[in-house]
Image (cartoon, grey):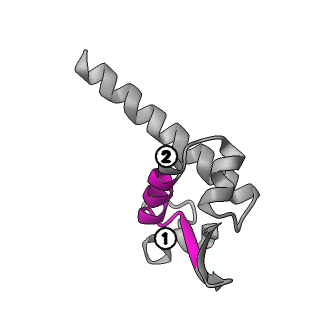
Amino acid sequence: MLEKANKIRFLNSMKNKCFLYETINKKPGLTIYDLTKEVNWTSGKVNHYIQKLLKDRIIKNSTEIENGRVKKQYFPVNYKELINWDEMTYNNGDKNDT
């Protein structure tokens, strides 16, 4: 029973991360405050998933000072930055090449 509950929690967590990423991807440059209004979540929930996305390097942030206050904006990472090109290999269809 506990295993099933953990699986459900994991799937819900992944769903929330994907939803927040899609929102950031559609509207880059939003702050946590803007995101809370956009997705109708608490600031704590948004911050939790922002930290997960930053740790996974799926999004990045920029910090600037506006009217004496720190303003953090969040942006999606270009998919080309997510690919480890050193691990990529070219396979021309020859079954002996792997």
Q: Residues within 10 Å of mark 1 (few under 14, many from 20)?
A: few
Asked if residue 97 can be seen in this view, the reply is: no
Q: Secondary structure at mark 1?
A: loop
The residue under label 1 is 88
On screen, 43 above or below 40? below
Q: Specify which label sits upstream in the sequence, 2 or 1.
A: 2
Where residue 63 sits, quadrant-wise, is: bottom right
The residue under label 2 is 45
On screen, 18 above or below 72? above
Which residue lies most toward the front here? 68
Where residue 33 sits, quadrant-wise, is: bottom right
Q: Amino acid at mark 2?
A: Lys
On screen, 27 above or below 41? below
Tell me if residue 36 is in the magenta stretch: no
The percent coordinates of residue 67 (x first, y second) are: 68, 83
The percent coordinates of residue 56 (x first, y second) are: 44, 62
Kindly identify the residue that appears in the image at 69 percent across and 63 percent down.
30
Q: In the drawing, what numbered circle is on residue 15?
A: none
Stretch of the chain drawn in magenta: 47-62
Which residue lies most toward the left here? 2
